[in-house]
Amino acid sequence: MFKKTRPIPLELVILRIMSDRKNLSDKEKLQLSNLEKGYEGEVMFDSLIQDLDTLVINDLLLEMGDTLFQIDTLIIFNERVYLIDVKYYEGEYCYDAGIFKTITGIERKDPMLQLNRCHSSLRQLLQKYGFNYPIDAFLVFVNPDFTLFQPTQNPQIILPTQVNSFIKKLNKKVSKLNDKHEKLADLLVTLHKTENPYVRLPAYSYEMLQKGMKCGACRSFAVSVSRTIITCESCGCEERVEAAVLRSVEELGILFPGIRITTNLVHDWCKVIASTKTIRRILKKNFKAIGKTKESYYE
Ligand SMILES: [Zn+2]
Protein backbone atom coordinates (compact mmCIF):
# COMPACT_ATOMS: atom_id res chain seq x y z
CA MET A 1 0.00 0.00 0.00
CA PHE A 2 1.34 3.39 -0.95
CA LYS A 3 1.29 5.61 2.10
CA LYS A 4 2.55 8.49 -0.01
CA THR A 5 2.39 8.51 -3.79
CA ARG A 6 4.87 10.06 -6.16
CA PRO A 7 4.07 13.45 -7.64
CA ILE A 8 5.51 14.52 -10.98
CA PRO A 9 8.53 16.66 -10.01
CA LEU A 10 7.80 20.40 -10.32
CA GLU A 11 10.91 20.94 -12.49
CA LEU A 12 9.59 18.35 -14.91
CA VAL A 13 6.07 19.83 -14.98
CA ILE A 14 7.49 23.29 -15.71
CA LEU A 15 9.94 22.10 -18.36
CA ARG A 16 7.17 20.17 -20.10
CA ILE A 17 5.01 23.30 -20.25
CA MET A 18 8.00 25.36 -21.38
CA SER A 19 8.88 22.91 -24.12
CA ASP A 20 5.38 23.43 -25.55
CA ARG A 21 5.56 27.19 -25.32
CA LYS A 22 9.14 28.10 -26.28
CA ASN A 23 12.26 26.70 -27.88
CA LEU A 24 14.31 25.10 -25.13
CA SER A 25 18.05 25.69 -24.95
CA ASP A 26 20.29 22.62 -25.29
CA LYS A 27 20.86 22.66 -21.54
CA GLU A 28 17.11 22.77 -20.86
CA LYS A 29 16.51 19.97 -23.36
CA LEU A 30 19.07 17.80 -21.58
CA GLN A 31 17.57 18.64 -18.19
CA LEU A 32 14.08 17.76 -19.48
CA SER A 33 15.27 14.48 -20.93
CA ASN A 34 17.11 13.52 -17.71
CA LEU A 35 14.08 14.37 -15.58
CA GLU A 36 11.76 12.43 -17.90
CA LYS A 37 14.03 9.37 -17.67
CA GLY A 38 14.41 9.60 -13.90
CA TYR A 39 10.66 9.92 -13.44
CA GLU A 40 9.96 7.11 -15.91
CA GLY A 41 12.26 4.79 -13.94
CA GLU A 42 10.58 5.63 -10.66
CA VAL A 43 7.09 5.13 -12.07
CA MET A 44 8.23 1.83 -13.59
CA PHE A 45 9.50 0.66 -10.20
CA ASP A 46 6.29 1.84 -8.47
CA SER A 47 4.23 -0.33 -10.79
CA LEU A 48 6.43 -3.34 -10.00
CA ILE A 49 5.88 -3.00 -6.26
CA GLN A 50 2.29 -1.81 -6.28
CA ASP A 51 0.95 -5.11 -4.95
CA LEU A 52 3.32 -5.37 -1.99
CA ASP A 53 1.33 -6.11 1.11
CA THR A 54 3.13 -3.59 3.27
CA LEU A 55 3.69 0.14 3.70
CA VAL A 56 5.46 1.97 0.88
CA ILE A 57 6.38 5.65 1.05
CA ASN A 58 7.51 7.36 -2.12
CA ASP A 59 9.51 10.49 -2.73
CA LEU A 60 10.55 11.79 0.68
CA LEU A 61 12.70 14.83 1.34
CA LEU A 62 13.91 14.69 4.94
CA GLU A 63 16.31 16.61 7.14
CA MET A 64 18.75 15.26 9.70
CA GLY A 65 20.96 17.80 11.39
CA ASP A 66 21.97 20.14 8.61
CA THR A 67 21.65 17.49 5.95
CA LEU A 68 18.77 17.23 3.54
CA PHE A 69 18.33 13.85 1.95
CA GLN A 70 15.96 12.47 -0.63
CA ILE A 71 14.45 9.00 -0.69
CA ASP A 72 12.94 7.52 -3.85
CA THR A 73 11.19 4.62 -2.17
CA LEU A 74 10.98 3.40 1.40
CA ILE A 75 9.39 0.06 2.22
CA ILE A 76 8.50 -0.81 5.78
CA PHE A 77 8.58 -4.51 6.60
CA ASN A 78 8.00 -6.15 9.92
CA GLU A 79 11.59 -6.22 11.12
CA ARG A 80 13.39 -3.99 8.65
CA VAL A 81 13.14 -0.96 6.49
CA TYR A 82 14.19 -1.01 2.83
CA LEU A 83 15.67 2.12 1.37
CA ILE A 84 15.60 2.06 -2.42
CA ASP A 85 17.19 4.37 -4.91
CA VAL A 86 15.88 3.83 -8.43
CA LYS A 87 18.14 4.61 -11.39
CA TYR A 88 17.18 4.76 -15.03
CA TYR A 89 20.70 4.88 -16.48
CA GLU A 90 21.11 3.61 -20.00
CA GLY A 91 24.19 2.08 -21.62
CA GLU A 92 27.31 0.36 -20.35
CA TYR A 93 28.99 1.43 -17.14
CA CYS A 94 31.91 0.25 -15.01
CA TYR A 95 32.07 0.42 -11.26
CA ASP A 96 35.35 -0.30 -9.53
CA ALA A 97 36.98 0.99 -6.35
CA GLY A 98 34.37 3.69 -5.85
CA ILE A 99 34.66 5.01 -9.38
CA PHE A 100 31.52 4.93 -11.46
CA LYS A 101 32.04 5.66 -15.13
CA THR A 102 30.70 5.01 -18.59
CA ILE A 103 32.45 2.39 -20.69
CA THR A 104 33.99 5.27 -22.64
CA GLY A 105 35.56 6.58 -19.43
CA ILE A 106 33.32 9.51 -18.47
CA GLU A 107 33.15 9.57 -14.70
CA ARG A 108 29.76 10.08 -13.07
CA LYS A 109 28.70 10.76 -9.50
CA ASP A 110 29.06 7.58 -7.46
CA PRO A 111 25.46 6.49 -6.83
CA MET A 112 26.59 4.15 -4.06
CA LEU A 113 28.16 7.01 -2.15
CA GLN A 114 24.90 8.92 -2.41
CA LEU A 115 22.95 5.89 -1.23
CA ASN A 116 25.27 5.34 1.74
CA ARG A 117 24.95 8.96 2.85
CA CYS A 118 21.19 8.70 2.62
CA HIS A 119 21.30 5.44 4.57
CA SER A 120 23.32 7.02 7.36
CA SER A 121 21.06 10.09 7.60
CA LEU A 122 17.95 7.93 7.67
CA ARG A 123 19.40 5.69 10.39
CA GLN A 124 20.14 8.73 12.56
CA LEU A 125 16.68 10.14 11.94
CA LEU A 126 14.93 6.90 12.89
CA GLN A 127 17.05 6.61 16.03
CA LYS A 128 16.23 10.19 16.98
CA TYR A 129 12.54 9.29 17.03
CA GLY A 130 13.08 5.97 18.81
CA PHE A 131 12.78 3.57 15.90
CA ASN A 132 15.58 1.06 15.82
CA TYR A 133 14.74 -0.96 12.73
CA PRO A 134 17.72 -2.07 10.68
CA ILE A 135 17.84 -0.50 7.24
CA ASP A 136 18.79 -2.31 4.03
CA ALA A 137 19.72 0.01 1.19
CA PHE A 138 19.55 -0.92 -2.49
CA LEU A 139 20.41 0.69 -5.76
CA VAL A 140 17.96 -0.60 -8.36
CA PHE A 141 18.72 -0.11 -12.06
CA VAL A 142 15.47 -0.56 -13.94
CA ASN A 143 16.34 0.31 -17.52
CA PRO A 144 16.67 -2.96 -19.50
CA ASP A 145 19.32 -1.25 -21.66
CA PHE A 146 21.72 -0.84 -18.76
CA THR A 147 24.79 -2.99 -18.12
CA LEU A 148 27.26 -2.67 -15.27
CA PHE A 149 30.72 -4.21 -15.22
CA GLN A 150 32.10 -4.72 -11.72
CA PRO A 151 34.91 -6.92 -10.42
CA THR A 152 32.75 -8.44 -7.69
CA GLN A 153 29.04 -8.52 -7.31
CA ASN A 154 27.63 -6.05 -4.81
CA PRO A 155 24.44 -7.41 -3.18
CA GLN A 156 23.18 -3.84 -2.75
CA ILE A 157 23.16 -3.29 -6.50
CA ILE A 158 20.17 -4.76 -8.33
CA LEU A 159 20.72 -4.93 -12.09
CA PRO A 160 17.89 -4.95 -14.65
CA THR A 161 18.07 -8.73 -15.08
CA GLN A 162 17.79 -9.16 -11.30
CA VAL A 163 14.87 -6.82 -10.73
CA ASN A 164 12.15 -9.45 -11.16
CA SER A 165 13.67 -11.86 -8.68
CA PHE A 166 14.27 -8.97 -6.28
CA ILE A 167 10.57 -8.04 -6.47
CA LYS A 168 9.59 -11.69 -6.01
CA LYS A 169 11.64 -11.81 -2.80
CA LEU A 170 9.95 -8.65 -1.58
CA ASN A 171 6.54 -10.14 -2.31
CA LYS A 172 7.42 -13.25 -0.30
CA LYS A 173 8.34 -11.29 2.80
CA VAL A 174 5.65 -11.64 5.42
CA SER A 175 4.69 -8.32 6.84
CA LYS A 176 2.78 -8.31 10.09
CA LEU A 177 2.63 -4.61 10.62
CA ASN A 178 1.41 -3.05 13.83
CA ASP A 179 0.69 0.43 15.17
CA LYS A 180 4.37 1.19 15.54
CA HIS A 181 4.98 0.70 11.82
CA GLU A 182 2.01 2.92 11.02
CA LYS A 183 3.39 5.54 13.40
CA LEU A 184 6.75 5.45 11.65
CA ALA A 185 5.10 5.87 8.26
CA ASP A 186 2.96 8.77 9.51
CA LEU A 187 6.00 10.41 11.09
CA LEU A 188 8.02 10.27 7.87
CA VAL A 189 5.16 11.66 5.82
CA THR A 190 4.78 14.51 8.36
CA LEU A 191 8.52 15.24 8.30
CA HIS A 192 8.58 15.38 4.49
CA LYS A 193 9.60 18.80 3.22
CA THR A 194 7.57 20.13 0.33
CA GLU A 195 10.02 22.88 -0.59
CA ASN A 196 13.22 21.57 -2.09
CA PRO A 197 15.99 24.20 -2.10
CA TYR A 198 18.03 22.09 -4.53
CA VAL A 199 15.45 22.30 -7.29
CA ARG A 200 16.87 24.36 -10.13
CA LEU A 201 13.97 25.83 -11.99
CA PRO A 202 14.74 27.15 -15.45
CA ALA A 203 14.45 30.88 -16.05
CA TYR A 204 11.39 32.10 -17.98
CA SER A 205 9.02 35.00 -18.15
CA TYR A 206 5.42 35.47 -19.28
CA GLU A 207 6.51 37.44 -22.33
CA MET A 208 8.78 34.73 -23.73
CA LEU A 209 6.12 32.01 -23.73
CA GLN A 210 3.82 31.27 -26.63
CA LYS A 211 0.19 32.08 -25.81
CA GLY A 212 -2.73 29.92 -26.84
CA MET A 213 -4.73 26.89 -25.77
CA LYS A 214 -3.31 23.43 -26.17
CA CYS A 215 -5.12 20.24 -26.93
CA GLY A 216 -5.45 18.30 -23.68
CA ALA A 217 -4.46 15.06 -25.37
CA CYS A 218 -1.59 15.86 -27.77
CA ARG A 219 -0.60 19.38 -26.57
CA SER A 220 -0.92 20.85 -30.07
CA PHE A 221 -1.83 24.55 -30.32
CA ALA A 222 -3.80 23.85 -33.51
CA VAL A 223 -7.27 23.96 -31.99
CA SER A 224 -10.47 25.45 -33.30
CA VAL A 225 -13.05 26.85 -30.94
CA SER A 226 -16.81 26.82 -31.21
CA ARG A 227 -19.16 28.22 -28.59
CA THR A 228 -18.71 25.37 -26.12
CA ILE A 229 -16.21 22.93 -27.64
CA ILE A 230 -12.57 23.11 -28.64
CA THR A 231 -11.49 20.67 -31.33
CA CYS A 232 -7.89 19.67 -31.98
CA GLU A 233 -6.95 19.84 -35.63
CA SER A 234 -4.02 17.47 -35.08
CA CYS A 235 -5.63 14.58 -33.23
CA GLY A 236 -9.35 15.32 -33.45
CA CYS A 237 -9.80 15.32 -29.67
CA GLU A 238 -12.71 17.43 -28.38
CA GLU A 239 -13.00 19.13 -25.03
CA ARG A 240 -15.43 21.51 -23.40
CA VAL A 241 -14.20 25.10 -23.58
CA GLU A 242 -14.63 25.48 -19.86
CA ALA A 243 -12.38 22.49 -19.08
CA ALA A 244 -9.77 23.71 -21.55
CA VAL A 245 -9.74 27.22 -20.06
CA LEU A 246 -9.37 25.77 -16.56
CA ARG A 247 -6.44 23.67 -17.74
CA SER A 248 -4.81 26.79 -19.14
CA VAL A 249 -5.41 28.68 -15.86
CA GLU A 250 -3.82 25.79 -13.99
CA GLU A 251 -0.71 26.09 -16.18
CA LEU A 252 -0.51 29.79 -15.42
CA GLY A 253 -0.71 29.05 -11.70
CA ILE A 254 2.08 26.45 -11.94
CA LEU A 255 4.37 28.70 -13.99
CA PHE A 256 3.69 31.85 -12.01
CA PRO A 257 2.68 30.99 -8.45
CA GLY A 258 0.82 33.89 -6.85
CA ILE A 259 0.02 35.61 -10.15
CA ARG A 260 -3.31 37.48 -10.13
CA ILE A 261 -5.71 35.58 -12.34
CA THR A 262 -7.72 38.28 -14.10
CA THR A 263 -10.09 38.00 -17.03
CA ASN A 264 -7.73 39.95 -19.27
CA LEU A 265 -4.72 37.85 -18.32
CA VAL A 266 -6.53 34.58 -19.02
CA HIS A 267 -7.95 36.02 -22.24
CA ASP A 268 -4.43 36.90 -23.39
CA TRP A 269 -3.02 33.55 -22.26
CA CYS A 270 -5.71 31.47 -23.98
CA LYS A 271 -5.66 33.67 -27.06
CA VAL A 272 -8.13 31.64 -29.12
CA ILE A 273 -11.23 32.46 -27.05
CA ALA A 274 -12.69 35.50 -28.77
CA SER A 275 -14.84 36.86 -25.99
CA THR A 276 -13.71 38.07 -22.58
CA LYS A 277 -17.30 37.41 -21.47
CA THR A 278 -16.78 33.66 -21.86
CA ILE A 279 -13.58 33.84 -19.82
CA ARG A 280 -15.24 35.95 -17.11
CA ARG A 281 -18.18 33.53 -16.88
CA ILE A 282 -15.85 30.53 -16.51
CA LEU A 283 -13.68 32.23 -13.91
CA LYS A 284 -16.71 33.43 -11.93
CA LYS A 285 -18.16 29.94 -11.89
CA ASN A 286 -14.97 28.21 -10.74
CA PHE A 287 -13.14 30.71 -8.57
CA LYS A 288 -13.87 33.29 -5.92
CA ALA A 289 -13.88 36.83 -7.33
CA ILE A 290 -11.95 39.39 -5.31
CA GLY A 291 -13.16 42.96 -5.99
CA LYS A 292 -15.94 44.06 -8.28
CA THR A 293 -14.23 46.47 -10.64
CA LYS A 294 -12.33 45.92 -13.86
CA GLU A 295 -9.34 45.12 -11.66
CA SER A 296 -11.02 42.18 -9.99
CA TYR A 297 -9.13 38.91 -9.85
CA TYR A 298 -9.90 35.31 -8.98
CA GLU A 299 -8.66 32.90 -6.36
ZN1 LIG B 1 -4.69 16.95 -30.08
Image (spheres, helix red, strand yellow):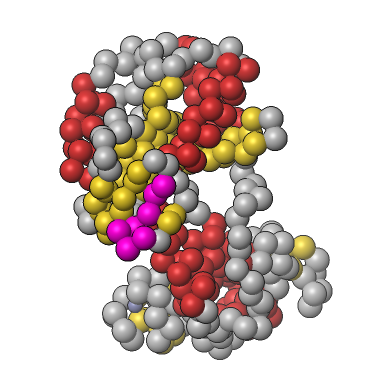
**Relative to residue 176, is residue 152 depicted above or below?**
below
Expressed as whole percent of the image width and height from the top left, the position of residue 181 reads 46, 16
Q: Looking at the picture, tell me which residue is in the foreground, 298 or 175.
A: 175
Residue 240 lies, with reference to residue 11, above or below; the image says: below
The x and y percentages for residue 20 are 47, 77
Residue 104: in magenta span: yes
Residue situated in front as seen by the camera: 157 or 212:
157
Vertical side of 232 occupied by 286: above or below: above
* Residue drawn at x 53%, y 14% as measured from the top left: 131
Q: Is residue 241 left or right of residue 276?
A: left
Q: Which residue: 39% across, 17% down?
A: 80
**Along the line of sight, which residue is nearer the eye, 247 or 200?**
200
Q: Which residues are magenta?
A: 99-105
Quadrant of the rendered image holding ligand 1: bottom left
Residue at the (66%, 77%) spot, across then down: 205
Q: Is residue 205 left or right of residue 29?
A: right
Left or right relative to 8: residue 145: left
Find residue 121 and report its horizontal and vertical position in percent: 57, 29
Is residue 5 in sight in this rendering?
no
Residue at coordinates 41% horizontally, 47% vertically from top-left?
Answer: 99
Query: Which quarter of the rendering shows the C terminus?
Result: bottom right
Whole-percent x and y of residue 163?
23, 39
Residue 31 appears in view: yes
Q: Nearer the viewer, residue 1 or 64?
A: 64
